[in-house]
Image: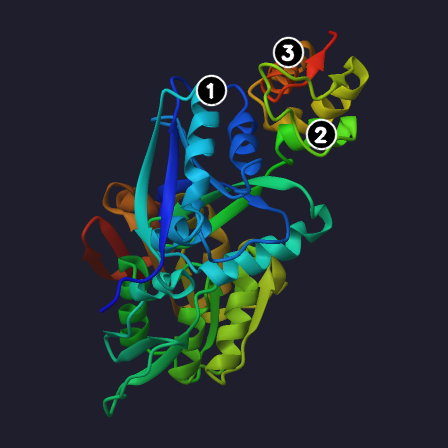
Amino acid sequence: MAKKVSSVIKLNIAAGKGTPAPPVGPALGQAGINMMEFLKKFNEQTAPQMGFTLPVEITVFEDRSYSFKVKQPLMTDLIKRAMGIEKGSSNPSKESAGKLTRAQALTVVKQKIADLNTDDEEQALRIVAGSARSMGVETDF
Amino acid sequence: MTPGPVWTKVTAHLEDEPLDWSVWAEAFERHGLPGTVQTDDPPTMSAYLPPGSEAGLVPLAAFLTARGARQVTTEQVPEEDWAESWKQFFKPRRIGGFLVRPTWEECDLSPGLIEIVLDPGQAFGTGDHPTTRMCLVLLEERGAAGLDVADIGCGSGILSVAACRLGARSVVGVDSDGPSVEAALANARRNEVAFDVHEGKGFEPFANQTFDLVLSNIISAALIALAPEAARRVRPGGAWIVSGIIQENWGDVLKAAERCGFQLQRKETEGEWVAAILVR
C-alpha cells in the first residue's frame, strides 16, 4: 500500500484554540506535516466545542500526508461539565470537589464510550468513577 | 548569538498505560497547561512550560508524583519557528522534465523545464515519493498532448497539473478524500491550469466517459479492483499508467490488467516500488 503509516501522534488540544506553540509545534514539525493546514482544520472543526480539551490522533504516512481524528472531550472535562464544577479538588487526597451521581456518570459514559476500550456500560462506569476519584470527586455507585 | 527563549518540556512517566488518559491531561491542565502529548509505549504524558514560567515546575512535578507518576523528567526545548519548520522537508526538485516547487520556495527555472507549483495541504503527492516521481516520468514519456486524461486518486493534483502542462485536451481528477479534492483544486488555480476534480471512487463520477490516458497512483488492491473498469474507459490504443505498487504485488496487478486486455509497455522500479505503462 502506498500509504504506510510512519507514526501516530496523540495530542490533547483546547478546542478551537490550536496554535503552533508547544506541544503542537514540536510534535508536528518533526513529523514534517503541514502544521498550519492541520491547525486551521482542527480549529474550524472544533470551534463549537470551545471550552473542552479534545484528544486528537494524527496518523502520519510515510509520504508525509496525514489524516486526523478528533475524539470526544477529555473524560475529566465531561465529569466537570456533568457536575457543573470548574475544576477538580486542589488536594484530591484530602479535599472533595463534590459528588458525581450515577445518573451524571451515565451521561459521561454515553458521550465517551466510543473512545474507551470497552462497550460494557458497567465497566465504563467504573472507569468514570476511577477518573472522578483521582481528581478528588466522590462517587456513590 | 544570545540564546533565545527556552520552553521546559515536563514528562510524567507512568507505570502502566492508564484506563483513562484524561486523568493525566487534567493534572497538567489544572497547572495552566491544557495542551499535552501522549505516548503509549512507554506510557508518558508531556506538556511544555512557556519561557519564564519555570516557577510552575516544582508544584507541577509534585502534583504529578502525588498522582502516581513513576518519574517526572524535564527537557529544555529552545523556541523555534514551529509553524514553518515542517517546510524544510519539501524542497524544489527536478523530476524528469519537471521542476516541482513548493509554493514557499523560490528558485530559478532552467530553460526547458516545466514548472509545477504545489502546496500539498493535507494530501498525498509532493513529488517527494518514489511512486509520484515514477508516475511523472512515465507520464512525460508517454506524453499527453491533445489527449483526454483521467487521474484516478489524484491526491494533491500533481499528476493532473503535469498532464495539463503537457498539453492535454482535457483532464479530470477524482479522489475519495475531501481534503485532497480541495488541495487539487487549489493547485490547479496556483498553476493556472483548469481541470475538474470530483470527490468519489474510481470512475464513478464520469458516467460513460472514455479517455486516452488514465493515471492511477493508488495502491495495488485498488488497481486490481479497478482493472476491468479501466479497460472499458481506456480507448483502444490508449494507456493506463499505474503506480503505488510494491514489488511483491506487481505480479498480481499485471495479471489482473492482462486479463482485462492490457499489455505491459514499460515498467519502472525504484526501491520497493513499481510503476508501469499498460496499453490497450
Quadrant in which the C terminus of chain B appears: bottom left
Q: Residue at x 21, y 48 (%)?
A: B272
Give percent across and percent down for residue B126.
36, 65
Is residue B151 shown above or below A59? below
Q: From the image, which quarter does the N terminus of chain B lie in?
A: bottom left
Q: Is residue B125 above or below residue A89?
A: below
Instruction: Give the mark toward the camera: 2 or 1.
Output: 1
Mark 2 lies on residue: A80
**Sequence order check, earlier mark of 3 and 2:** 2
In the figure, residue B262 lies in which quadrant?
bottom left
Discs 3, 2: same chain: yes
Work out whether B72 lies above or below B112.
Answer: above
**Please, what secondary structure does the residue beneath circle 2 have?**
helix
Q: Out of B260 and A123, give the one closest to the viewer.
A: A123
**Would residue B153 be visible to someone looking at this image?**
no
Chain containing the residue with disc 3: A
Numbered marks: total: 3
> Which amino acid is tagged 1?
Ala
Badge 1 is on which residue?
B66
In the image as oriented, which residue stretches furthest toward the bottom?
B111
Q: Name the residue under label 3.
A: A126
Measured from the top left, where is residue A68 in percent x and y? 52, 46
Element class at badge 1: helix
